Amino acid sequence: MNAKHKRTLASIFHEPVRSDVKWNDVEKLLKALGAEISEGRGSRVRVALKGVRAVFHCPHPQKVTDKGALKSVKRFLITAGVKK
């Protein structure tokens, strides 16, 4: 995991929830952690990491992840055993 991935991870775990995290950075972090990512129907993205599966909605047309989705990603990472 490089420095940018670490900053993205810190942004996901930041309290209060941030509103400036780009979805593209979240996907890159998930890949760096070893997650399998596949496209679902519409703008859904399926993610599997350490036996934990989740489906997220890729934001469009904006590039920034909304606060609710960021909370879901944080819960997913915690469940998968990822710590900041």
Image (spheres, rainbow, N blue to C red):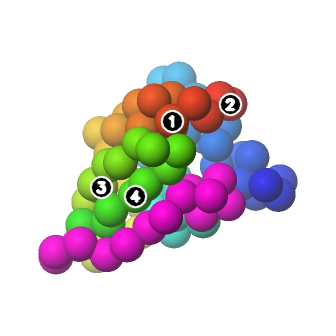
Residue 37: in magenta span: yes
Q: CA distance from mark 1 to mark 2?
A: 12 Å
The reply to whether residue 66 is visible in this rendering is: no
Q: Are marks 4 and 3 in contact (CB under 8 Å)?
A: yes
Q: CA distance from mark 1 to mark 3?
A: 15 Å
Of the 4 image quadrants, the one containing the N terminus is bottom right
Task: Tell me the distance, in whole angstroms, between the alpha carbons under discs 4 and 2.
Answer: 19 Å
Q: Which residues are magenta?
A: 30-43
Marks 4 and 1, Cα distance to the nearest angstrom? 11 Å
Amino acid found under the numbered disc labelled 3: Phe
Q: Percent from the top left, x then y, of residue 82?
A: 61, 34
Q: Nearer the viewer, residue 13 or 49?
A: 49
First reached walking from the N terminus: tag 4 or tag 2: 4
Q: Are marks 4 and 1 in contact (CB under 8 Å)?
A: no
Disc 1 element: loop
The secondary structure type at the circle numbered 4 is strand
**Residue position marked by numbered label 3 in the rendering:** 56
Q: Position of residue 10 (x, y in %)?
A: 66, 37
- Is 29 drawn above or below residue 68 in the view shown? below
Disc 4 or disc 2, which is closer to the eye? Answer: 4
Which residue bears the numbered disc 4? Answer: 47
Query: Marks 4/3: CA distance?
Result: 8 Å
Q: Which residue is mark 1?
A: 80
What is the three-letter code of the residue carrying label 4?
Val
Crowdedness near tag 2: few (<14), some (14–19) or many (≥20) residues, C-alpha within 10 Å: some
| Mark toward the start of the polypeptide (4 vs 1) | 4
Helix, strand or loop under label 3? strand
Q: How many marks?
A: 4
SS at circle 2:
loop
In which quadrant is the C terminus drawn? top right
According to the picture, the residue beneath numbered tag 2 turns out to be 84
Mark 3 or mark 2, earlier in chain: 3
